[in-house]
Amino acid sequence: MIIPAIDLINGKVVRLLKGKFDSKHEYFFNPLFYINHYINNGAKKIHIVDLDGAKNPKKKQISLFKNILSNIKIPLQIGGGIREQKDIDFLFNLSSISQIIIGSSAIQNFRKVKKWFKIYSPDKIILAFDIKIDVNKQKIIFINGWQNNSDVNLELIMKKFINIGLKNVLCTDISRDGTMLGPNIDLYNDITKKYPNISFQASGGIHSLNDINNLKHSGVKDIIIGKAFLENKFTFKEANSC
């Protein structure tokens, strides 16, 4: 599935370059304009991240999410600053058909997230692992809106969560995100072969229809596209027809 991405800072649609908050680009229209545009062109799900909340959970854009969720009837996958069970309940009360994206909490508080797996079921949770590949080819996860190095290796955390029923993973190579230099195909070839029972989502660097075809052949289930749509590199309908 092709899933359009909407990243939000202070109520505005933005894209970051390689996860850097000081390298953001703001887009002209409000979030609902873009979301409805994608839905009208056939999107079946939207990916939304509260970057304010990801950076500082105390600054989650709650009123904005209430507005978005009350106006959208298709499933969303929502992330950014989800640290407590009340955050999950708030989102599911607004949209029971959606999924939540857990990033930093999966690294910082395994026991808490393990409990969420039991309460909400693994089907409702997507773990987001944002990585940088170091000189030793290790896939190191970054947290808190990509600001901090967790020193945790992707394979280590995957093993822990697979043991409790992990099903959905969004993996982003931060070095590609927002660059439109192409996705890290080698990364997705590697992880889909290592973990064939996991439904992977790919994001970062996508800039052409050829990128989409290459990702589909890599074994990922879903492809998250943000900047390429916002900058009219191709349309949702073109991407969906690949």
Image: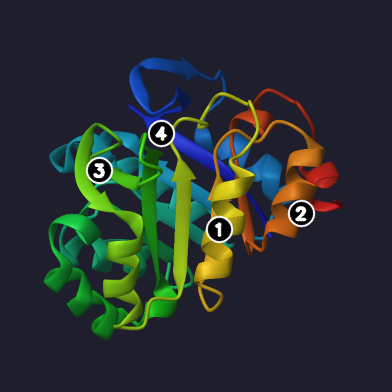
Residue appearing at x 21%, y 76% in the figure: 114
Disc nearer the start of the sequence (1/2): 2
Kind of element beneath mark 2: loop
- Closer to the camera in the image, 131 or 41: 131
Q: Is residue 168 left or right of residue 224?
A: left
Distance (Cα) linking label 4 and label 2: 22 Å
| Category of crowding for the residue at label 2, using alpha-carbon neighbours closer than 10 angstroms: few (below 14), some (14–19), many (at least 20) | few
**Relative to 160, is 182 above or below?**
above
Kind of residue at badge 4: Leu
Kind of residue at badge 2: Gly
Q: Nearer the viewer, mark 2 or mark 3?
A: 3
Disc assigned to residue 190: 1
Q: Is residue 5 left or right of residue 67?
A: right
Residue appearing at x 26%, y 65% in the figure: 88
Disc assigned to residue 143: 3
* Residue bearing the label numbered 2: 42
Give the quarter of the figure containing the N terminus. Answer: bottom right
* Residue bearing the label numbered 4: 8
Kind of element beneath mark 1: helix
Distance (Cα) linking label 3 and label 1: 22 Å
Kind of residue at badge 3: Ile
